[in-house]
Amino acid sequence: MRIGTGRATGHHGELLQGVFEGSDGRLHRGLMTLPMAREDSVATFWPRPDGTISTRPENRTKAARAAKLALTHLGLAQAGGDLTIENSIPVGHGYGSSTADVVAAIRAVADAAGTTLRSDTICRLASEAEGASDAIAYEDQTVLFAQREGRAIEHLGGELPPLIVIGIRALCAPIDTLALPRARYSTFEIEMFRALRGAARRAVLYQDPRLLGKLASCSALISQRHLPKPQFHEFVQLAEAHGACGVQVSHSGTLVGALFDATQRGLEAEILPFMDALQETGRRKITAFAVNAELDFLS
Amino acid sequence: MKHAANFLAAYEMPRPVQLRRNLFAAFFPLMKLLPARFMLDRAVDEGLLKQGGHIIETTSGTLGLALAMLSAIRGYKLNLVSADSLIDDVMLRRLTSLGATVNIVGDPGKTGAQIERVNALQEMRRQMPTAFWPHQYDNPHNRQAYGRLTEWILDRFGQVDCLIGCVGSGGSLCGTGGFLREMFPQLTMIAVDTHRSSLFGHVPGPRLLRGMGNSIRPANLWQNMIDEVHWVGALPAFAATRQLYRDHAVYAGPTSGAAALVAGWYAQTNPEKKTLVILPDEGHRYQATVYDDHWLALQQGWPLPVPSGPETLERIEPRGEEAWTRLAWCRGSTEDT
């Protein structure tokens, strides 16, 4: 083995989250992640022959467990090593900081073993290490992902449509993802998720940010019934007034984001006043990033 | 729930048809399979329907056929109540060939014998207290079944501006429209009814056009979702059904003809609106009637050319079987008007 490195990005919550019928005909909890490439976790793995894993910073137990699972998967169960993690993703708001560590650790171990793993494998190992994870290992590929099972329900077959996301943290305390009670969806909501899945397929197939925005808004509204975010409706109104094509939330975090069609002409003239208006409502921290888009005015 | 690889799961879905530049149709072979399957699945989930259990329902139409098909495949016993004025020999043989028992009540007045049928059903419920009654008119699962159609619509056509469909139980139109409105609150919904149906305030009476309209007002019809109501008489529906076959090779029943008539007019007068119309069944049941020129020639008022547009009404007002009327409903209710 050699010294290996791995990287994984954060995310800004979900575009869609609910329950979805799998190929087995049963319902599975699932989500579509909104990746945020500007923040990331970088892991470096220094192999040692003694079988134990140590981390720096100390006590990154999920990442250590993930490294061990990756070694076992690669047939190197007796190996160990030192895992260093440098992570710029804020913790506890729903940016997927801990999953990014886990995915980066698995990739670093694979790199140390001179190989790369499939996204499906990384997600399965990540979910085993963490209990629940997100679809960040798929990067810009759109996947309907069963977060508690660590596997894809459906590959939607492409990258997300071009979007600009302007996000804030809702004014509430950080959330422990695994401690949250699971949402009990009504029959209507379950069937609505079925319909939204159809819209998601088309939005990806035809790279349609506006249809994606509408389905994300719908999913966010359902989420609001189960895990309400303060001032959500005020945010939606403000976003719509500034030409957003939808809103999204982190279903187990505090994030709320406005989605803009990155192909729209004169978008800057909509987004900058929107960010100013958000500032006026007293938000200190505004996150702005692009997904599958070529725009430079945000930097 | 486990229907992903099932033959009837494919059968319950429509085929897409483009009728105009801005008009698309969901053309079902047998739409009622969708709510029938969904109501049975939910009943199984809720413990109301056991393996080998008993199902009872009052229907003479395609819901009965759908229940009979599902019962045959899944091993349920099925008792249907109908009236001699509503059921034809071909349908009766299809149902009994699938193993269903059909109880037929007499209906000399040809009004549909709604009360007699309900009485017969209630008597059956007393005799078989554990039997499952889908109760399609009031069961919310009838509406909720149309999430699967909405998925199909969104996947194929994306955002639609207007949804048009016939109303009998209200399930397909209010169900599909309810899901679509969650995403597109501005969606226009147009209900297609027929004269002397009580759904939108006519006094119920004999109707030549079956399979849509109703003598009662089901709970699954949410009037306050509807933007516009059309009442299509049997004759323009028959003419439109034949035209639909002649122009598009869509071999559909007369309720589909009525819906296509309204949808064609709406799409033409609103060329900027992407319109979707639900066509609920195929024409095989109507081979000896709507598709038979001799039978048509015997109908009073026939021949009748396909009308180019409806007469716009100011208030609720029934007309003859030759008429096609419309009323701006504005998401109101019978009580408002």
Image: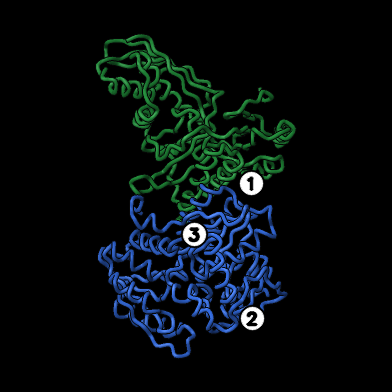
Chain colours: A green, B blue
Secondary structure found at label 3: strand
Quarter of the figure with residue B173: bottom right
Q: Quadrant of the N terminus of chain A?
A: top left
> What's the residue type where badge 3 is placed?
Phe
Near-viewer residue (A226 or B133): B133
Q: Which chain is mark 2 on?
A: B
| Residue type marked 2 | Arg
Which of the marked residues, 3 or 2, is nearer the chain's N terminus? 3
A203 to the left or right of B68 = right
Q: CA distance from mark 1 to mark 2?
A: 47 Å
**Secondary element at tag 1:** helix
Cα distance between the residues tagged 3 and 1? 39 Å
Residue topped by disc 3: B27
The residue at which mark 2 appears reads as: B319
Estimate how packed mark 3 is, as few (under 14), some (14 to 19) or many (20 or more) residues with alpha carbons within 10 Å: many
Marks 3 & 2, CB-CB < 8 Å contact: no
Q: Percent from the top left, x then y, of residue B51?
A: 26, 63
